[in-house]
Image (cartoon, rainbow, N blue to C red):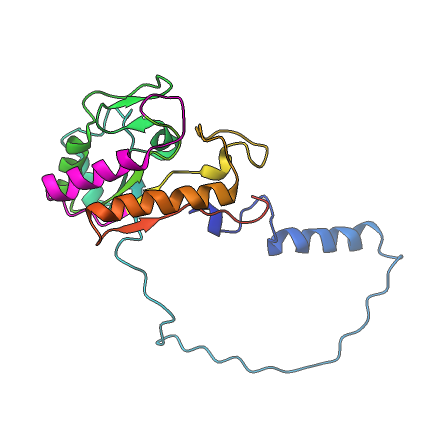
Amino acid sequence: MQTEDHFCRLSGKSCFGTTQHSLFGALALSPLMCAVPSLAQTTATVTVSANTPLGTIPSTAVGVNTAVWDGDLLDTAVPGLLGQAGVTTLRFPGGSTSDDYHWQTGSTSDGAYVNPSNTFDAFMGVAHQAGAAPILTVNYGSNAAGNGGGDPNEAAAWVDYANNTKHYGIKYWEIGNEIYGNGEYGASWEYDLHSDHSPSGYGANVAAFASAMKAKDPTIKVGVVLTSPGD
């Protein structure tokens, strides 16, 4: 999930369990080599206000990543199952495919498989039946010709079609998927044909994308891709 960047993982990035294991492992291996000072006896009072909320989980918090290559997306049982599961948001066109997928032609720049039935409008039918809010990820990685980075005009045309032509009223849009996987930091799994893969390059391009998209519908919310240091 686009959320993976905000959670402590079991592999141990500053996880308490990892630190605890290292400390006790060291003590167990060499119990005579270190002296553990006695701790002064202290007292503390902890007050828990169980009835005082610190925040509210938004209704859009529970979501599912859909995919244009999914052969089951349009099954008649899917909307009902999503509703029963409490899913309130559906993301389209799906993960890394987003930076390769062209919504107008239902094709990809590198020839990756797309289920021809899983058009944007078909996806919207599923979202409406499930009572879920759509989140659309525009193609940041590639233009229609497949010889350069994503085209802000292609993204803007999607906003125009969705909200002005079809009147879907889609509020949430994001620019690209896991852009930090474009090779800038070594690992390369994300399709990105821009010549500049740097964070500053992404930032400049985001400004162009957001401007073009909001020119079609100034009420939309545009999200960007972030990652934690060292991820």
- Which of these two is toward me, 23 or 191? 191
Is residue 198 toward the left or the right of residue 49 in the image?
Answer: right
- Which of these two is toward me, 222 or 73? 222
Q: Picture quarter containing residue 109?
A: top left
- Image coordinates of residue 114 in percent, x first then y, are 28, 21
Seen in the picture, residue 134 relative to 150 is either above or below; the reply is: below
Residue at screen point 19% across, 32% down = 120
- Image coordinates of residue 54 in percent, x first then y, are 38, 71
| Res. 2 in view | no
Is residue 52 toward the left or the right of residue 83 in the image?
Answer: right
- Which of these two is toward me, 164 or 227? 164
Residue lying furthest left: 166
In magenta stretch: residue 201: no
Residue at screen point 78% across, 52% down = 26
- Image coordinates of residue 83 in percent, x first then y, are 19, 45
Residue lying furthest right: 33
In magenta stretch: residue 159: yes
Say which quadrant the C terminus sits in: top right
Is residue 70 toward the left or the right of residue 34 in the image?
Answer: left
Q: Report the span colored magenta.
A: 144-172
Say which quadrant the N terminus sits in: top left
Q: Number of labelled discs?
A: 0
Residue at screen point 84% across, 56% down = 31
